[in-house]
Image: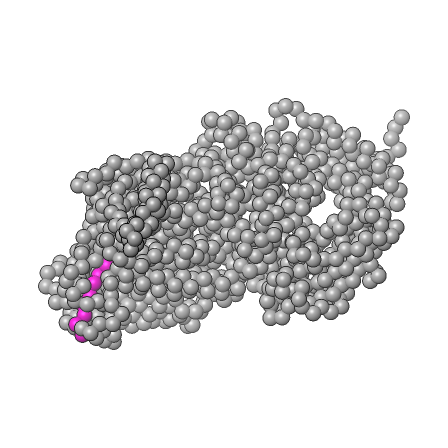
Amino acid sequence: MTSPYPRLVRGITFDRCNKFLSRNFYSDVNLYSQLYKKCESSKDYIELRVYSVPNLNRITFEEAIKCEYKKAECGDKFGPSWSTHWFHISVKVPENWKNEEVHFIWDSDSEGMIWTVKGVPLQGLTGGYGSDRRADYILTRCCKGVEKFEFYLEMACNGMFGNGSNTINPPDPNRTFRLTTAELKVPNKDAWGLFYDFQIILDMAKEIPEDTVRSAQALYIANNIINVFRPGDNKSILECRKMAQEFLKNKNGSTQHKLTAVGHCHIDTAWLWPYDETKRKIARSWSTQVGLMDIYPDYKFVCSQAQQFEWLQEHYPKLFDIVKNKVEKGQFLPIGGTWVEMDCNIPSGESFCRQFLYGQRFFEHNFGKKSKVFWLPDTFGYSAQLPQIIRGAGLKYFFTQKLSWNNINKFPNTTFYWVGLDGSKVLTHMCPAESYVSQCTPGELVNSVKNHKDKEYSNESLLVFGNGDGGGGPLASMIERLNRMKDIDGLAKVEMGSAEEFYERIEESSKELVSWKGELYFELHRGTYTTHGSIKRFNRKSELLLRNVELISTINLIKSQTENKESNYNYPKKELDKLWKYVLLNQFHDVLPGSSIEMVYVDATKYYKEVEEKGNLLLENAFDELFQIPKSSESSEKGLLAYNTLGWNRTEVVEVPVCEGVDKLPQVSVDEKTGFILVNDVVGIGAQGIDLGIPTNFSPHGMGREAELGTVKIFETGPLKASLLLESKITATSTLRQVISLSAVSSRIDFDTTVNWDENRQFLATYETQFGFIQRPTHYNTTWDSAKFEVCGHKFADLSEYGYGVALLNDCKYGYAVHGNVMRLSLLRSPKAPDAHCDIGVHNFKYAILPHACSFLESNVVREAYQFNVPLFVRPTSKEIVQTYNTKSYFTISNAPNVILDTVKRAEDSDGIILRLFEAYGGHAKAILTSSLPLDNIYETNILEEHTCFINYNHQDGAVIQFKPFQVITLKMNLRVHWTVQVDTLSSGYVKFSFFVIKVRIVALLTWRRDQDIGVHWG
């Protein structure tokens, strides 16, 4: 018998199938029209009352319920952008809906969140018609009859991606949002089941190669389902479902690719919305996910960024407790190990360490477990030093995705070992679906096989699904599709699981994975090393300020322990933690690179200014304690002390304020407000009194550089420092002012630059990495080379040949380019989106040229770059203190000029001392660490300050520390403290507290036996 129908035409049939599911075409007679059986929007059943919060404030639930509400209805408009409107909603379910599942549907074209009347966040809502739409909330699974419900709804006047009309354009401040839907509905579960079945069958027909039997069968079944379907006839829907199930029941073979599906909700800590909106996005997104976990017990959801967990704990404690319960059940999986998903180019090596230190400690303290997976899907390139730091923080695995977006070179691997500068390696995976916001479609499963570049080594990959960037996370529809696609002929096998278990299987089964050595350079988002120059300056200055505060505060702690003096000094741990968290927060991968809206930088600047203000106050107080400077002095004679916070001796010309009682300055500035003095051989991490006599013994440095200048005049002249002032117009609207200086004791030429910048989309163009350096070619031989036309560097870039070289130093810039023998440093940039006013304003920065008569590896460029960024601290004090101050260094590194002492701080959980050192030139080193302190013991630790090995030490010879190239080593020291116990006696002759003293000694002994570290509790 021949068919009465013509052969299927693929294009026409696909169009027919798409319209069968469409909400825009034939939605009165297609499958979409059958998704709900009943609907009610009458005011008799739904009462809306609203309170509009004034002045764009975001108020708490406790504040909101005390406010006065007024009537509202569908059709009302709310605004402007970023405003908040609280609704009190009362619902009565119709009597004839007994035993039905009832949904509340809400669409205000914006984000929102439902709260119980007791203040528990229940679920987030997202309006509009995008793939992230989440408009329904399940009121009850089985209505008991005439039921009443009462709840609150917090409406935020912004979309999932802010207020830039779903683009990265600057936000429109005057958007309004119309409440289009507030109704009750009863879902037709049979129709919804067919809807998900049909989506899978149709997508299989599209995505599986059309010359295969499976693709042809899928299109044929989809077309037949439409033929059988009859609107309003539920029996036809059941018949269609049987046809779908018959097709979907065919299973895979045993060799099919296996996917581990992991729910995920990438929430940018700031981007097209400010930090305060992120706090609400977290609650909206995570409350939704814990609700899905109740419905789908196998569902697992990973979530990174300890900062976001801390915000949840602070602002939504009830929801945090619910999340914590899901963590204990193994469904809600904290991951990542860092404070935020940070930029991985610009932060210092120490900032990287603190990201992991604060992140891992938060996870362990609150959830009882540290992360093993460094989770960072979305950032703009990855430093070559990260693998070592990742391993040093107790993690073994790395997940990212961004490199699949490269627009010049396709990254060659999906599962591989990433090898860092020092040889450390981490097992790395990028989803071959090439997305961290997968929607759980057959097409993504097909691409997971097609794009997997390491099939010969591994037959598994991850599928990371859920709406993201603006939050939201997985929808119920995604989980429904996943459950249907677990094992279908023609698609990869997929099951829900955890990322950590996936990596453990790969590590065990795939022994021959390839390796990628060095940085992971991202080729798409450009200008991120330069944009928002003020934020990058704040970052550098804040990192170094906190470094100095910690160092001087630690010295004070040491003095209080070892000098047997009464001291009320308390190490400012709490204050430092707060300031460090501000710095780490602002290193988020859309903040520090400069890719956020203007509102974000208002917040970031506020945090940085608090770091600057409070950090400088802490530093001032620490120096006062260190030098014991009296608050008032009768002596009119004052002296100067120079303090060196770097780990080697320094000779420098320094600028000091002209102050009363300090005379005989050898050179005074033109404005007579400051003077210049030569400070000779200040010991590393130590101080020296300053001789104010005119220097007569120094060697001039003759290496210079010829340059074309604008209008120039002599600015400073004298035996110590000479300066030229250059003032010129860069363009018709922008000006430049530079003071170019050369000191008596260095060949370095300094450029102190102020630019009034008023340009659009132009460069003012003219390379170190974390704990080391990276070498890159200076040619464009390959597309991989050409793609790196601008690269990231920190305090210096250097161009050398045998016997000679030139370094370019800076105090706050990160974008370099070297081509041939031309070096450029990107100083300013002003894109117009998403911040329309980016970089417009006054900027201050310094850079310097440092010629050296040797190769880079023989030079002192690393130390000079540190000195350029960390000047000597010069402070007025009494001459008595100047004459008596002990100039002996607390810590000395000898026998290894290639080893840098970068960080000195107090230990996290004791009064022990932490030193962080690194090998800076890519060679082995045998460093000798000596100290003037009475050290009891030294341990090598990881970044989390957990002991890894004991270091042999004696006071006379010090400790020998062996370094591999670019190795970072963390040491923990404990002091040998001599305790003086004062015992009071009572008149009766009994000893007061004698038993207590004995008890304390016993506890100390037990602690020492357990930890082998008396300093943990008694240092």
Q: Foreground: 428 or 941?
A: 941
- Residue at 66% x, 60% y is 154
Q: Foreground: 930 or 677?
A: 930
Tell me the quarter of the picture where residue 260 sits: top right
Residue that sits furthest to the left in the current view: 696
- Residue at 78% x, 62% y is 47
Vertical position of residue 844 compared to residue 888: above or below:
below
Vertical position of residue 509 compared to residue 888: above or below:
above
Q: Is residue 754 magenta?
A: no
x, y percent for residue 562: 24, 51
Tell me the quarter of the picture where residue 94 sits: bottom right
Q: Is residue 640 magenta?
A: yes
Residue 921 visible, this angle: no
- Residue at 35% x, 38% y is 1006
- Residue at 18% x, 59% y is 885
State left or right for residue 43 relative to residue 830.
right
x, y percent for residue 863: 26, 51
x, y percent for residue 211: 70, 31
- Classified by dominant secondary structure, the portion drawn in magenta counts as strand
Q: Foreground: 949 or 6?
A: 949
Residue 509 visible, this angle: yes
- What span is in magenta? 636-643
